[in-house]
Amino acid sequence: MTDKSKITPICMKKIIKVCHFSSVHKDNDVRVFSKECLTLATAGYDTTLIACDSQQDSDQVRLIKIKDQGGRLRRIFFRSFRVYRAALSTKADIFHFHDPELLPYGLLIKLTTRAKTVYDSHECYPEDIRNKEWLPRPIRVPVARAYQLLEDLAVRRLDLVVAATPYIHKRFERIARRVVTVNNYPKREEFAIEASSDTASIRDGVCYVGAISEIRGILPFLDSLSYTQPSIKVYIAGSFANDAIKEAAFSHPNWRRVEYYGQVSRSQIRQIYKRSFAGIVNFLRAPNHEYSQPNKLFEYMAAGIPVIASDFALWKQIVEPTPCGITVQPDSALALANAINLLYEDRALAHAMGRSGVHAIATQYSWEQEGIKLINAYREICAT
């Protein structure tokens, strides 16, 4: 029996040149490089990625590295232009960009070249802007509305929008020429060894891996440790959104229980997962969260770790039928603690939920099937 989810090279009359470009993401970004670019290269596309330097090399994807210098405003107004100029120099047949600040340049490429243009929308940005902690509250709504007007104007003229979730897809389906949902699910093989290994004896902690911010629930998680068994270890990895939340976390009385890794590699993340009996993803309520599909939720599942997730309706539809974890009120320290204690004390339940998560990844939530959707969307725009 053949594996229909396997990406195989396609027959092309000519080699199609593809340029992915980003002024925000590093050139080792999981979605941009490890999933999309490598999938396209495997399928026979001549693939270039322009992104911030991470010191990695690749023999499958041509990397053009941009120095990650300066603050947010410098990135928006200067680095994005440098990325655009570098992208133009590739003379690609398809330009695929990943950041909202690159919309004007994507539109400019569409209007001045014969190339196909693709906008990869990772978030529902008008809603995301309303919760940006670095923006002063009085201007969040006006900025969000202005951005939505720009986004609507641009995507009407682009060839394809790649939506990271069905909710984002719904936003664009009435205004874009083409939209395809390419979910950010994990690759099946990345955590397969850890998920199948007998690691129960070393799973002694609860983990949180990802961007650390107030809206992503770090403070309720730290509060919950006051009610968990003191023998439970706590593993946190990721970068803080700003100095204020970093200071709040470091000064929290329960931070002394945390083994903090900072920003880590994929191999280090696998080691953290291997030591964890539960994974936390307790984003606080916000429109852009309630309809999101966090990559970490699915990574925990792929690694055989029960998830403790926010009780959003969409997340409950993923977690509870599987069943691969427990959903809780995300800002309730006591609810989080009860879930952590339960999975720590009942290892048979934790193991069963972990195995259910692995099965769900294999059958429903793997990148392999999403990669085929990306390839098919490329074929469609190339045929027009």
Image: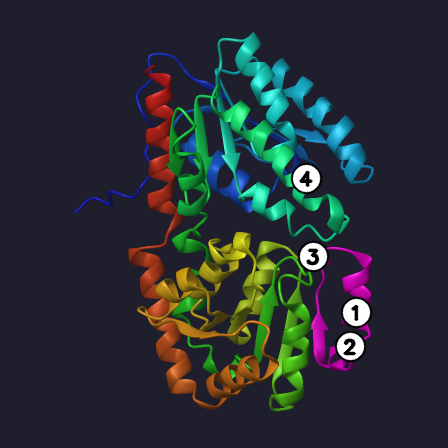
Give the alpha-carbon distance from disc 4 to disc 2, as whole Å.
Answer: 34 Å
- Judged left or right of residue 257, residue 164 is left
In the rendered structure, which segment of residues is drawn in magenta? 239-262
- Judged left or right of residue 122, residue 375 is left
Instruction: Please report the residue visible at 41 percent of the width from the left and 54 percent of the height from the top.
Output: 189
Residue 62 appears in the picture as rendered: no
Tag nearer the camera, 4 or 3: 4
Say which label, 1 or 4, has the lower sequence index: 4
How many C-alpha atoms fall within 10 Å of the one at disc 2: few (<14), some, or many (≥20)? few
Instruction: Please report the residue visible at 41 percent of the width from the left and 16 percent of the height from the top.
Output: 15
Q: What amino acid is found at the position of numbered circle 1 in the picture?
A: Ala
Whether residues under marks 2 and 1 lie with C-beta atoms below 8 angstroms apart, the answer is: yes
Instruction: Please report the residue visible at 46 percent of the width from the left and 65 percent of the height from the top.
Output: 312
Residue 381 appears in the picture as rendered: yes
Say which label, 1 or 3, has the lower sequence index: 1
Instruction: Please report the residue visible at 56 percent of the width from the left and 12 percent of the height from the top.
Output: 91
Q: Position of residue 289 (x, y in %)?
A: 53, 56
- On the image, numbered disc 2 is attached to which residue? 252
Whether residues under marks 4 and 2 lie with C-beta atoms below 8 angstroms apart, the answer is: no
- On the image, numbered disc 1 is attached to which residue? 248
Note whether 295 is above or below 313 in the view shown: above
How many C-alpha atoms fall within 10 Å of the one at disc 4: few (<14), some, or many (≥20)? few
Tag nearer the camera, 1 or 4: 4
Instruction: Determine whether the residue tagged by mark 2 lies in a helix, strand or loop.
Output: loop
Instruction: Determine whether the residue tagged by mark 3 lies in a helix, strand or loop.
Output: loop
Instruction: Determine whether the residue tagged by mark 4 lies in a helix, strand or loop.
Output: helix
- On the image, numbered disc 3 is attached to which residue? 263
Tag nearer the camera, 1 or 3: 1
Whether residues under marks 4 and 3 lie with C-beta atoms below 8 angstroms apart, the answer is: no
